[in-house]
Each structure stands twice: as structure tokens, then as C-alpha cells.
Amino acid sequence: MKLKLVIITFFLFSCSISLLAQDITELKPKDYLDFQLPPISVLYENAKASPILSYYEKKKQANKSLMDSEKKRWLNFIKLVTNYQYGIIGNNTTFSDTNTPIFYQYSGNKQSWYNFGVSVAIPLDDLFDRKNKVRKQRMDMEATEFEKEKWYDEQKIRIATMYSLAMRDLALIRIKSEALLFTEAQLKLSEDDFINGKISVQDLGRQKSAYTTAASEYEVTKADLNSSLLQLEILAKTKIISK
């Protein structure tokens, strides 16, 4: 009986080794049976929160500001001229003749001058090249919008690819989970039968081998699924398992 207990203890210890490492999801085999991915449309929409799209949007706004400034550059050709002066004009006179002694006379008055005008100076190269500069700024803005849409389309393709892998791995993990739960239950029954002398150690070993194979396949599929889900989280800016 002691030998049987030692063998069972060894089997239980070796079975638990592969399950000691905890994944960030903390999901058990039975949890995967009801696990659901969010709709791919939600992932597409959430991907718009990427800082790359914000960068392209800011770049497009900067191009638009440059285009608007270029359209208003004609105002640089026109200059307003104003002038204002204020002062007192004085006049000194001296008069004399044979019958009149010399006398001096001073007269003065305050005066103000206002001057307002407009000057126009048009560099011919700027005048004839202005339309091209505006067109270039508009094309830069459109090119930025195209880059933004191109990146978003490529991101959706990456999301769709990883989503398909996750769906495949999710289907596999459900199969592997059911197989693991079944072999685990069978192993427990075999342990009881071994203790009660109903089966031999070879029979218990075969059941242990089946459980080990199921557990190994489950862990491999689980790692693949978690990798796909974590990459989806990064691509789509959506929490799926790392909560």
C-alpha cells in the first residue's frame, strides 16, 4: 500500500509541474470553453485610438495651416503708410524807412499734417509662383490623408490576420480543454482503481501518459492563443485578457 501511495504522490507531483506557471490570463481549461472574442468591428474602431493616426491627423492640420498661410501671403504685397506731424510755424519780419524807425514783428501759428496712403510692391516670382505653392500645400495635405488611410487599412489587415489566428487557436483550445478535463478525470479514477488494486501500475502509467500528452498539447495551444490575443490587444488598443 505504501508503494502505491508513493507512486500516486509522484504522479500527482509530476502532473502539477506543467501547470505551476501561471499565465497573465489566469484562465483555467474550463474557462476557455465560454471565452468569446470581441467583434472584429470593435477592434477596427478601437484601432483608431492609435497614436500613429493622431500623428497623421496633426500632420494634416499642420499642412492645412501652411496652405492657409500661403493663401494669405498676398497681404504681404500691400503696405499701409501713415504719417502725422505737428508744429508751430513762426515768421520774423523787420521793417524801416526814412520816416520810420526799425521795428521787428513776429507771427506764428500751429499746424498739423496728416498723411495716409497705400503702397503695393509685388515680387513677380512670388506672384506667379503663388498658385504652385498653394497647390503643393494642398497636395501635401492630401498625401498625409492618404498615408493615414493606408496605414489604417494595413492595420486592419494585421488585426484581421491575428484575429483569424486567435479564432483558430480558440477553437483548438476548447478541444484541448475538453480533452484535458477528460483525461484528468480518467487519471483520478485510475488512481482510485490502482489504490483499490483494480488496475496495475502499467495501466496507471498509460493513463498518466495520456494525461501528460493532453496537458502538453493544451499548454502549447494556450501559449499560441495568448500570443495572438496579446498582439490583438496591442494592434487594436483593446483589453481582451490582460485586465
Image (cartoon, rainbow, N blue to C red):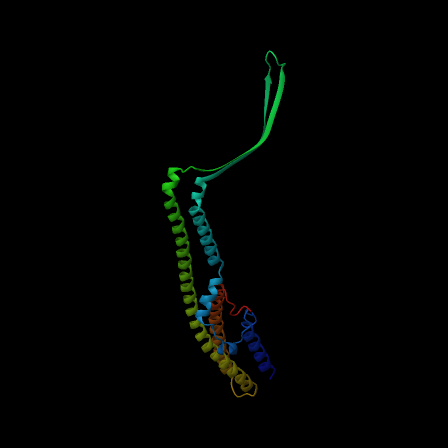
Residue 163 against residue 143 in the figure, above or below: below
The quarter of the picture where residue 159 lies is bottom left
> Outermost residue, front direction?
99
Residue 50 in the image: x percent, y percent? 48, 60
Q: Nearest the camera: 56 or 113? A: 113
Residue at 41% of width from left, 52% of height from top?
141
Residue 205 in the image: x percent, y percent? 50, 79
Residue 37 against residue 154 in the figure, above or below: below
Residue at 38% of width from left, 38% of height from top?
125
Residue 236 in the image: x percent, y percent? 47, 65
The quarter of the picture where residue 160 lies is bottom left
Q: Nearest the camera: 59 or 122? A: 122
Residue at 40% of width from left, 62% of height from top?
153
In the rendered image, which quarter contains the N terminus? Answer: bottom right
In the rendered image, which quarter contains the C terminus? Answer: bottom right
Q: Nearest the camera: 98 or 183? A: 98
Left or right of 186, for residue 160: left
